[in-house]
Amino acid sequence: MGIQGLLPLLKSIMAPIHVEELRGQTVAVDAYSWLHKGAFSCATQLCKGLPTSKYPQTLMFCTLLDAVAFGDARHIDYCMHRVNLLKHHGVKPILVFDGGILPMKIEQETKRSRTRKENLARAMEHETLGNSSAAYECYQKAVDISPLVAFELIQVLKQEHVDYIVAPYEADAQMTFLSINSLVDAVITEDSDLIPFGCSRIIFKMDKFGQGVEFQSLHLGKNKELDLTGFTKRMLLEMCIFSGCDYLPSVPGMGLKRAHALVKRLKSYDKVIKHLRYSAVSIPPLFEESFRKAIWAFQHQRVYDPAKEDIVHLTDIPHGVFEDLDFLGPYPSSATYAFTIHAMLYPFFL
């Protein structure tokens, strides 16, 4: 979902960029964002479990994996076109995939799954009534990028010797880890969550010609739409959480501009919450605890460290903290992680 309305409020510090400017660099790519965009052109077939081939008379009895083998899965073609675009301009891509569902996002994922099912039902109803354009629009909203779809792309990446990582949980946290540890020079995504996560350099809206817009955190103090002068990374993060994120819905009437004003004046989330309560704003009883957990999900989520070949936290847990951290995802051993990823990507071969 990202932080709703954040990118337009950072427009003044977004700069046009072409992929050629990344020559000689390594970038992490949000694989699911590319798969989602690629799936729009073949949403009906994916929702129905049909091949997305251009030659259905030849492949009518084939599976989606067969279509990939023939090179005619359109959502895979979409991704590989962009992979090859990067490589053509001397850029090394590392595609990053989501792994397991973070416990803090189970409710959000359940809602999204329900919405997809509702749109699928609407699409089939429109199709029955002969309203093809309305049906297609609903199929686009219903399409799900499943582990099987990720598996298809990974098979092609292996064949083409393109690096990839499957995160223990969220690709956003994994890409941020690669960024803050200088394992990549930039991140390509459509998700504004990467900004509160702490990525220093992000490329948004990259098109098929390699044109996009670049965000660099070092320019935040020059932003015109929201005055972020004096804002620390923690203040920016708290502002985004207050406005509503995947880990915690916002309180009534709280958007980015109001959250910005409150954090700018009061400096910390606990003081903002206390102020809201004094102002008779309806605050759920466990909101403060949930807010703290949301901060930790952005700062300390579990990720995979390629150097250690082990699961680590995005940033180190403060010394002396001994609470149950399973809300960040159960801590798997390397062997368990390998099995989990195997199970996720090979659901029909266990």
Image: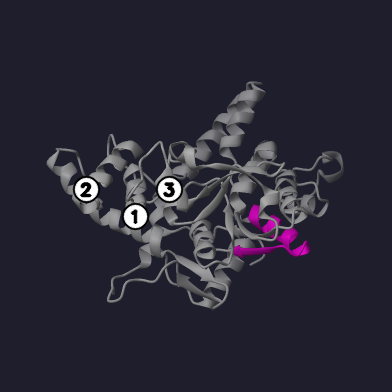
Within 10 Å of the Cα at label 3, are there few (<14), some (14-19), or many (20+) other Cα atoms? many
> In the depicted view, which residue is nearer to us: 253 or 327?
253
Q: Is residue 162 magenta?
A: yes
Q: Is residue 214 above or below residue 175?
A: above
Identify the mark nearer the N-term, 2 or 3. Answer: 3
Residue 263 appears left or right of 14? left
Residue 166 appears left or right of 226? right
Q: Amino acid at mark 2?
A: Leu
Q: Is residue 211 magenta?
A: no
Residue 255 shows up from this direction? no
- Specify the farthest residue to the right: 58
Residue depicted at 72% across the width and 62% down the height: 162
Q: CA distance from mark 2 to mark 3?
A: 19 Å
Q: Secondary structure at mark 2?
A: helix
Q: CA distance from mark 1 to mark 3?
A: 10 Å
Give the residues drawn in magenta, as a range: 148-165
Q: Which residue is mark 1?
A: 232
Q: Which residue is mark 2?
A: 266
Residue 11 lies, in percent from the top left, at 48, 38
Q: Amino acid at mark 3?
A: Leu
- Specify the farthest residue to the left: 278
> In the depicted view, which residue is nearer to us: 139 or 282?
282
Identify the mark nearer the N-term, 1 or 3. Answer: 3
